[in-house]
Amino acid sequence: MSGSDYYIPAGALLIALLVKSPWFWRNWHSPMAKSILVILASPAAGFLFGAPPTIERVNRFIGVPNISALIVFCILSCLSCASNVLLIHWRGDAEDVLRRRTRIWVAATAALIVTFCVLFHLGSMPVERRRDFDTFYANTPFVRELIVLSLTAHFATTLLVATRCWRWARGLRELHAAWTHAGLLILVAAFGFGLSFALFKFLAVGARWAGTDRWDWLSTDVAPPLAGVGACMTAVGILLPAIGQGAESRWRALHRFRRLRPLWSEIRRDIPPTSPPPMPWWKPVERRLMQRETDIFDAVLRLTPWFDHTTGTKTYALALADHSESRRARSEADASVLAHAVIRKGLARPPVTPEQRWTITSTEDSEDLVDLSAAMLRSPHVRTTRRTTAGDGLGHGER
């Protein structure tokens, strides 16, 4: 592989880091946020320090031959630790249990990194190897143990994470957690590539132990691309649930915001003057939706004294006779009462007495509010109420 083959996946992971950076900043004290940060940053750093041009520069800068290999081994250990810590927090448990398990993994990883450093110090690696460090030093005392320990730890932790992801994905299949389920399946495939990376490295090293270098290409030409694909898929699997759920939530909020427009337009003149003006379109749709719902509730409260029970009862009976759906009929009745109240209040007609007042129930539930808005737009009974009420006002010389 050339330097670009390493730098391209590193760049993709850095882009993912930049996309998630605001979330990291807001949730810096969360162990889950820190785990995701390490999972994205460590493979990016691994590819950066594993690229042949970088290996040469790092070795020259530090002045120790093959020190870049030790750095990559330590980075892989951090990636394995962060992956397990993330899964621990994803699954959830008591706070003290999560804290204890996290500390165990961090302590084990720290001990592993110290062991790497000791073995590297004891080994003799005078010849710089930019692409075939694992196979070239496969039979060197202490370095051999360093390579085997690193690959074994990476293989074992990757297998553990892949197994956990697969079991969890199977458990989520019936829980309507589509984005998390998809993310876990992508992680299973990503860690499968990580397992293949370690396996091919093992095969090449084992061939060297058997006295042949014919399989070196598995370590130098096959394993690195697999690691690149696996790292990019890991980033996708981690980001997908958050991005997918966020996009789905924003789409639902936008859909609801638009569906509430007929109702909001009908009663907007009765929104209290102290309410803030509508937010511009570039503001988050969730905030715009909250403001629209608040405006609707405030306007409904101001119109309550003009809610005529006779109008509601009549419309409800007519709508129920039309389609025999009580919920829809109730929405049409409430919409007619609102349309009637807007016109009567605008004509300065006196409020109805409390005994003659209709109680609107379509604002008690979020879905009912949407149904109320749809009825305001489409119900023929609402249009009839508008014409009748307006005509009554004109007939009395009030317009």
Image: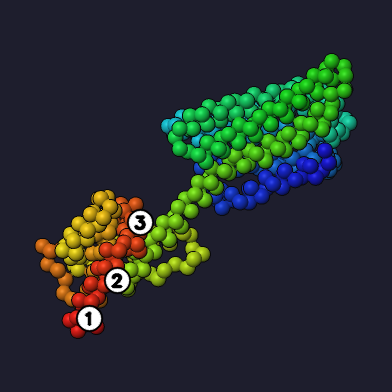
Residue bearing the label numbered 3? 370
The picture places residue 71, in percent across and down from the top left corner, at 74, 36
Secondary structure, mark 2, is helix
Nearest the viewer among 286 and 42 is 286
Q: Amino acid at mark 2?
A: Asp
The quadrant where residue 337 appears: bottom left
The picture places residue 18, in percent across and down from the top left corner, at 63, 51
Select label 3 or label 1 by which is in front: 1
Q: Earlier in the sequence, mark 3 or mark 1?
A: 3
Secondary structure, mark 1, is helix
* Mark 1 Cα-neighbour bin, 10 Å: few <14, some 14–19, many ≥20: few
Q: Amino acid at mark 3?
A: Val
Q: Are marks 3 and 1 in contact (CB under 8 Å)?
A: no
Q: Earlier in the sequence, mark 1 or mark 2?
A: 2
Select label 3 or label 2 by which is in front: 3
The picture places residue 295, in percent across and down from the top left corner, at 34, 65
Q: Quadrant of the C terminus?
A: bottom left
Residue bearing the label numbered 1? 394
* Mark 3 Cα-neighbour bin, 10 Å: few <14, some 14–19, many ≥20: many
Residue 351's place in the image compared with 317, above or below, is: below
Q: Are marks 1 and 2 in contact (CB under 8 Å)?
A: no
Is residue 301 visible in this depiction of the protein? no
Nearest the viewer among 63 and 183 is 183
